[in-house]
Amino acid sequence: MLITIDRFEGDFAVCEMKDGKFSSLPKEFLPSGSKEGSKIRIELDLDAEEKDRERIKSKMNNLFKG
């Protein structure tokens, strides 16, 4: 999903979505250097999700061994 920063209001960025709707995101979620008019791509990171699942599964297995 590609969003455009429309403006900043306090600690939030008001962003326009592809469908023309607006949503506010905390500034802390934005990449450094973001400004009005910046385009930001939001996407799932399935590889990172899988790595987390494997890490948690390993921890659970170690916890319940013995």
Image (cartoon, rainbow, N blue to C red):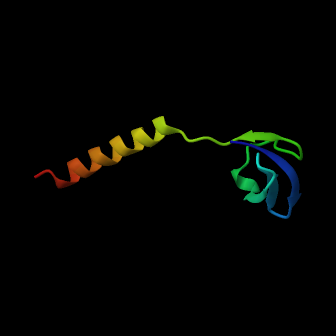
Q: Disc count in the image?
A: 0
Q: Residue 52's image quarter? A: top left
Say which residue appears at 37% left-offset and 45% top-offset: 53
The image quadrant where one finds the N terminus is: top right
Q: Residue furthest front?
A: 19
Say which residue appears at 76% left-offset and 60% top-offset: 24
Q: Position of residue 48 (x, y in %)?
A: 48, 39
Q: Where is residue 29 in the image (x, y as percent from the top left)?
A: 69, 52
Q: Residue furthest bottom?
A: 10
Q: Residue 34's image quarter? A: top right
In this picture, residue 64 sits left or right of residue 24: left
Q: Residue furthest top?
A: 47
In this picture, residue 37 sits left or right of residue 47: right
Say which residue appears at 89% left-offset and 47% top-offset: 36
In this picture, residue 27 sits left or right of residue 7: left
Taking depth in this image into account, of 59 and 39 the one nearest to the observer is 39
Q: Position of residue 6 (x, y in %)?
A: 87, 51
Taking depth in this image into account, of 14 and 26 the one nearest to the observer is 14
Say which residue appears at 21% left-offset and 48% top-offset: 62
Q: Residue 13's image quarter? A: bottom right
Q: Is residue 17 above or below residue 23?
A: above
